[in-house]
Image (cartoon, grey):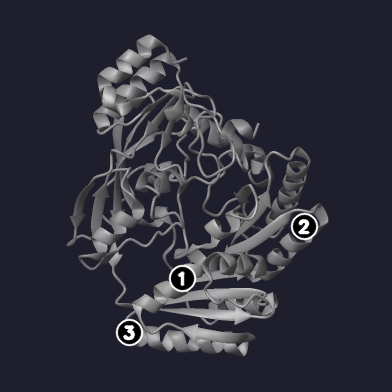
Amino acid sequence: MVDAELLKSLEAIVGSARIKTSREDLLTYSYDAYVKEYLPEVVLFPKSTNEVAGILKLANERGVPVTPRGSGTNLSGGSVPKKGGIILCFTMMNRLLEINRANRYAVVEPGLVVAEFQKEVEKIGLFYPPDPGSSAVATMGGTVLMNAGGMRGIKYGVTRDYLLGLEVVLPSGEAMNTGGVTAKDVTGYDLTRLICGSEGTLAVVTKIIVRLLPKPKTRRTMQAIYSRIDDAGTTVAKIIEAGIIPASLELMDNQIIKAVEDFAHLGLPLDAEAVLLIDVDGDPEIVEKQAKVVGDFCKAHGARDVKVSQSEKENEQLWVARRSVFGAVARLRPTCIVEDATVPVSMLTAAVKKIREISERNRVQIAVVAHAGDGNLHPLVLCDIRDKEEMARVEKAFEEFVDYALSLGGTLSGEHGVGISKAKYLAKQLSPTVMAMTRAIKKAFDSKGILNPGSFLEYAE
């Protein structure tokens, strides 16, 4: 679909240095953090909204697929070119355009790395809370299109909660602005939030306006070790019931503990069934009180050991275990698939036990880490994608867990998106009416279907 004539026109827009067509280059953009690979026909690196508009106008006229991409950390196959065509990579469109301290907002380009942005705003006493596990490499544009969350979601919410406005380019090549810099705006439909989480199927984001918070003055981290996972689950429920809202509340099961200890040698007890990592933040006096209350809750509900940090350095040392999870577990088998269902917090322990049961029945190895405070489970399925018989058991196990999570009032995805990894289950959660409305919205934005084709809408049919 991308012929020599189109390549020449695209090169005229971005220049020869920002277009890749060799097979070796294309292979490096054929995959993301999910397990399936699709080869693009060309990769482009725009640096301006005008360039994006020109590319989309050409692609739309010729019916060529376009898949927007940041750093490729997507865990559901959302940033791979399912139908070939153009990869529109935003890593060169990565400027921090403005930090407005008086009105507490910032304007950024989509290719800016989340952690780099956070460091810059924190230098002047401000704070951007969304913190996906891949924040050291994930881009702001990717987090907007996936509505990414992270470990601070329990207290601070997810990306959409900080999104004030966008500049986007439609498939036709027309640019438009949604929202703005003010804290309140109820003028017309909320297109900003519609585009947030749309997985690159409606429009291409070229500028992002986010609100900022004052940076918390202090933070304390607690690590609680449990011999019984039920006690860890009870602790989570009791903390929430008590009206304490930690900044983070994470759970790791025994398989995760063993993998992390083998990988990082942190002194984690290999016989523990669960570890909770808990952050509280805010004014020093409040943080000290909350840290004591949370620590007492942990001890009262079965924690055999509780460590409380005394400095920012100790905070980071305690969090090494959680941030090492994916790398530690991925070493164990050729393939590691990270899933993303969410259940009511009160059902967290039951859900972890259900995963164990499903794992044993289907003879599939599954380790579990969770954003325990908001019920967001990440089963890490360890397998070998080359083994078709094993992969059939993996699919069966995951479908059983999807059915279980939905039966509790849970969801298919808490923060990773649907992409292609969970698309075939979409109709289990969304009614035919909702699916019809979703497709109508897609048609209104993208009448020729060039943006991220082959993604969740097509897969769900």
Residue 198: x and y in percent read 47, 41
In front: label 2 or label 1: 1
Q: Residue sitting at 37 percent across and 62 percent down?
A: 129
Residue for point 45% across, 50% down? 147
Which residue in the protein does label 3 denote? 284
For the point 37% across and 44% down, the residue is 141
Q: Earlier in the sequence, mark 3 or mark 1?
A: 3
**Which numbered mark, 3 or 1, is in the foreground of this view?**
1
- Horizontally, residue 271 falls left or right of residue 414, namely right
Residue type pointed to by label 2: Ile
* Disc 3 element: helix
Give neighbour class at mark 2: few <14, some 14-19, many 20+ (Cα, 10 Å).
many
- What type is the residue that disc 3 sits on? Pro
Marked residue nearer the N-terminal end (3 or 2): 3
* Closer to the camera in the image, 29 or 289: 29
Which residue in the protein does label 1 denote? 319
Q: Are marks 3 and 2 in contact (CB under 8 Å)?
A: no
- Measure the C-alpha gap from mark 3 to mark 2: 44 Å
Q: Tell me the residue that label 2 is attached to.
A: 358
Residue 67 picture location, percent across and down = 45, 31
Q: Under tag 2, what secondary structure?
A: helix
Residue 300 sits above or below residue 26 on the image: below
**How would you rate the neighbour count of disc 3 (Cα within 10 Å): few for under 14, some for 14-19, many for 20 or more?**
some
| Residue 142 located left or right of residue 322 | left
Place of residue 189 in the rendered image (x, y in percent of width and height, measured from the top left): 39, 42
